[in-house]
């Protein structure tokens, strides 16, 4: 399979692909011209029928026989399912270096260990961004939101390393440099302990200046790189930082991102800090909007959910991380009933401890069956797929351009091999994909009309070389001690009223 490329212009047709239509599955031809879907036609119908989408299409003589027609590349997708690409709507790529090693701890202690051992070399940032992109692609994702942890003193270099990795792979990247203006211990409620926090390494204004440089240097949607404003969350950010981010996102028309009420400790902290809920506060300062996506949203009250709906903010559901860190179960069925847009994220690989989007979609869908006896509210596989694709696109204010197979949208899509052992025997393809345990099911991926995966392999980078680099730059290890965890654990136990206080 290859694509004819004339400079930036791409033109090809995929035929015999199974796609989902209202009445079930249909065999379809999809044509791509200049990076966008230019025509979609059911192959058992005439192109003059209402099921034909697209104008001035050269797709005018069905049925297709395969091979090149009139110089155009034709790809046979028999026994393959074509779906819009999913969005991995929240992750932290450099956590890949610490997957599998942090012991079972809640977020506030887990993050202390994470930061004690965070990578400080831009080459590591580059490699873990490559790894995150590859694992996202091979589990159905075509876009990734990287809430990128910055190396102190090398902030723009960190972003540059991730940008070059994502551009080499060819995945659509939304990079939100992770910023804050308080030091880590400020993320815990103080209770009545009178704890004092060290000053943060950089002033609020210096951080906002850094973001302005990052936007001007790296935001380039045409080249597949988008910058987001992404203060880490209310636990470590001042109102001045949030307001500066709002101002930049308005000035440059960029999306906003943050963590929101991931843990019970954060809910308590919001009350201490604002005397109201975090959601009410973010609404008051103007952070919530249709261009705002918020990771986790586990500890929201019904009144907060109403605010999320009213401001048309997006919830990014990260079920594996919430289970791993004991954060709780996000009230996703309530969000859906209130009309709040929900998408899926893997979250960083140190709280997951992988980066398999299909796994996050599966767990994030069936997890909620235990939260509501009324099975009519449960999430169907079809709804899961829509949340992962269109829901992801909406959260990035990009649903006009991606998230569904429609004429005029970007050619960001994935072919799944329905003859893969894990997708057999033949029943409902989407049911198998979401509820099953698909392995090696992604056959091909196109992003912006460019083929990135073919025959189940990423074609744009040397994955064997990546494996070797990840191997060589790490070592087997079972025990390490985090000084920061030892320092703050007793405070955490005290304010969270855990037995023994130590
Ligand atoms: Zn996160």
Image: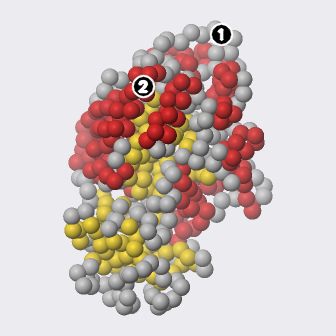
Residue at 65% across, 39% down = 298
Please tell me whether residue 391 is drawn above or below residue 53 in the rendered image: above
SS class, disc 2 = helix
SS class, disc 1 = loop
Q: Confirm or reject: label 2 Cβ below 8 Å from ligand 1.
A: no
Image quadrant containing the N terminus? bottom left
Residue at 69% across, 47% down = 310
Q: Is residue 91 visible?
A: no
Question: Residue 462's mark?
Answer: none
Please name whichever residue, 155 or 197, is drawn nearer the observer in this view of the structure: 155
Marks 1/2: CA–CA distance:
30 Å
N-terminal-most mark, 1 or 2: 1
Q: Residue 204, image x and y in percent?
A: 46, 21
Q: Is residue 371 visible?
A: yes
Please name whichever residue, 262 or 411, is drawn nearer the observer in this view of the structure: 411
In the picture provided, is 19 more to the left or to the right than 289? left
Q: Quadrant of residue 28?
A: bottom left
Instruction: Determine crowd level at label 1: few under 14, some 14-19, many 20+ residues with C-alpha closer than 10 A.
Output: few
Q: Residue 454, image x and y in percent?
A: 31, 65
To which residue does mark 2 refer? 207
To which residue does mark 1 refer? 193
């Amino acid at each position: 399979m290859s694509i004819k490329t004339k400079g930036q212009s791409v033109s090809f047709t995929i035929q015999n692909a199974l796609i989902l239509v209202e009445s079930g599955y249909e065999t379809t031809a999809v044509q791509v011209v200049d990076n966008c879907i230019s025509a979609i036609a059911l192959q058992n119908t005439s192109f003059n029928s209402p099921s034909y989408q697209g104008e001035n299409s050269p797709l005018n003589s069905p049925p297709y026989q395969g091979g090149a027609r009139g110089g155009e590349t034709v790809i046979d997708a028999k026994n393959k399912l074509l779906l819009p690409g999913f969005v991995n709507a929240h992750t932290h790529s450099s956590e890949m270096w610490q997957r599998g090693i942090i012991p079972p701890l809640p977020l506030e202690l887990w993050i202390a260990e994470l930061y004690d051992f965070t990578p400080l070399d831009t080459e590591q940032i580059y490699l873990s961004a490559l790894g995150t992109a590859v694992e996202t692609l091979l589990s159905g994702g075509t876009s990734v939101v990287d809430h990128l942890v910055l190396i102190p003193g090398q902030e723009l270099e960190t972003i540059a390393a991730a940008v070059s990795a994502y551009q080499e792979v060819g995945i659509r990247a939304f990079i939100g440099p992770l910023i804050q203006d308080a030091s880590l211990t400020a993320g815990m409620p103080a209770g009545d302990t009178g704890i004092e926090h060290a000053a943060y390494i950089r002033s609020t204004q210096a951080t906002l200046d850094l973001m302005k440089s990052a936007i001007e240097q790296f935001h380039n949607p045409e080249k597949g790189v988008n910058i987001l404003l992404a203060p880490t969350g209310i636990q470590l950010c001042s109102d001045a930082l949030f307001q500066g981010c709002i101002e930049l996102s308005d000035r440059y028309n960029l999306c906003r991102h943050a963590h929101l009420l991931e843990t019970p400790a954060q809910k308590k902290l919001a009350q201490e800090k604002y005397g109201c809920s975090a959601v009410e506060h973010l609404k008051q300062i103007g952070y919530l909007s249709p261009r705002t996506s918020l990771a986790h949203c586990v500890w929201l009250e019904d009144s907060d959910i109403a605010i999320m709906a009213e401001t048309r903010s997006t919830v990014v559901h990260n079920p594996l991380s919430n289970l791993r860190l004991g954060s709780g179960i996000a009230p996703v069925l309530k969000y859906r009933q209130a009309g709040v847009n929900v998408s899926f994220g893997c979250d960083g690989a140190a709280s997951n401890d992988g980066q398999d989007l299909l796994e996050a979609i599966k767990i994030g869908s069936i997890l909620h069956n235990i939260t509501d006896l009324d099975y009519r509210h449960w999430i169907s596989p079809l709804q899961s797929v829509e949340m992962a694709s269109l829901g992801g696109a909406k959260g990035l204010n990009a649903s006009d351009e991606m998230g569904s197979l429609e004429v005029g949208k970007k050619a960001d899509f994935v072919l799944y091999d329905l003859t893969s052992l894990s997708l057999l025997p033949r029943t409902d393809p989407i049911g198998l994909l979401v509820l099953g345990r698909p392995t090696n099911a992604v056959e091909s991926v196109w992003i912006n009309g460019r083929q990135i995966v073919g025959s189940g392999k990423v074609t744009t980078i040397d994955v064997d070389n990546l494996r070797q680099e990840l191997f060589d730059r790490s070592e087997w290890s079972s025990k390490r001690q985090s000084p920061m965890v030892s320092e703050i654990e007793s405070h955490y136990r005290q304010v969270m009223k855990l037995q023994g206080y130590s």
